[in-house]
Image (tube, rainbow, N blue to C red):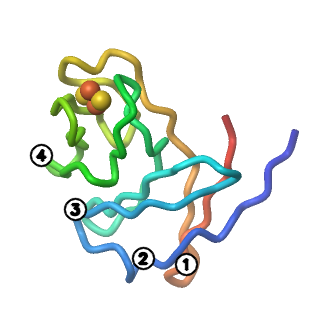
């Protein structure tokens, strides 16, 4: 099924190396600003029920879960540090004139 691009916010609203939580179709999605480039992953840690938008961006490309401090690569969703082993789903993102659009594909 073809998914539409959905407007989810503005680049200006997310500081560099910061996160922003949005809800799409009842699902939490976490947006990230890595050096001006926007990425999006599922908002819930695959290890437990933790909100990744409350975690910290470390090493310029990893999100550290606020609960047990496991990490994921924001750009690929890859689980990097234990106890995380299952990857995060990543969403396609595009930016047009400062507006962030996301395609909710699974
Ligand atoms: Fe995220 Fe355990 S819930 S590392």
Residue 91, percent across and down? 56, 45
Q: In which quarter of the image is the N terminus?
A: top right
**Nearer-N-terminus badge (1/3):** 3
Residue 17 badge: 3
Q: Distance between the residues labelled 1 and 4?
A: 26 Å
Element under label 1?
strand
Q: How crowded is mark 3: few (under 14 residues within 10 Å), some or many (20 or more)?
A: many
Q: Establish if 101 lies above or below 78.
A: below
Q: Residue at x 55, y 78 (%)?
A: 99
Q: Which residue lies furthest to the right in this view?
A: 1
Q: Gap between marks 1 and 3, in whole Å?
A: 18 Å
**Residue of label 1:** 99
- Above-or-below relation of 77 to 13: above
Relative placement, left or right, of 63 versus 3 is left
Q: In which quarter of the image is the C terminus?
A: top right
Q: Do the residues labelled 1 and 2 touch (CB within 8 Å)?
A: yes
Dot 1 or dot 2: first in sequence order is: 2
In the rendered view, does 84 fall on the left or right side of 103? left
Residue behind label 3 places its C-beta within 8 angstroms of ligand 1:
no
Residue at 57%, 63% in the rendered image: 94
Q: Which is nearer the eye, 97 or 87? A: 87
Residue that label 2 marks = 11
């Amino acid at each position: 099924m073809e998914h539409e691009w959905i407007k989810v916010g503005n680049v200006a609203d997310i500081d560099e190396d910061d996160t922003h939580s949005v809800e799409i179709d009842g699902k939490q999605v976490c947006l990230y600003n890595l050096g001006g480039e926007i990425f999006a992953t599922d908002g819930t840690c695959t290890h437990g029920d933790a909100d990744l938008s409350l975690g910290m961006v470390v090493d310029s490309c990893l999100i550290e879960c606020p609960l047990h401090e496991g990490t994921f690569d924001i750009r690929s969703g890859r689980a990097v540090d234990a106890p995380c082993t299952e990857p995060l789903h990543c969403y396609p993102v595009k930016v047009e004139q400062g507006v962030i659009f996301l395609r909710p594909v699974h």
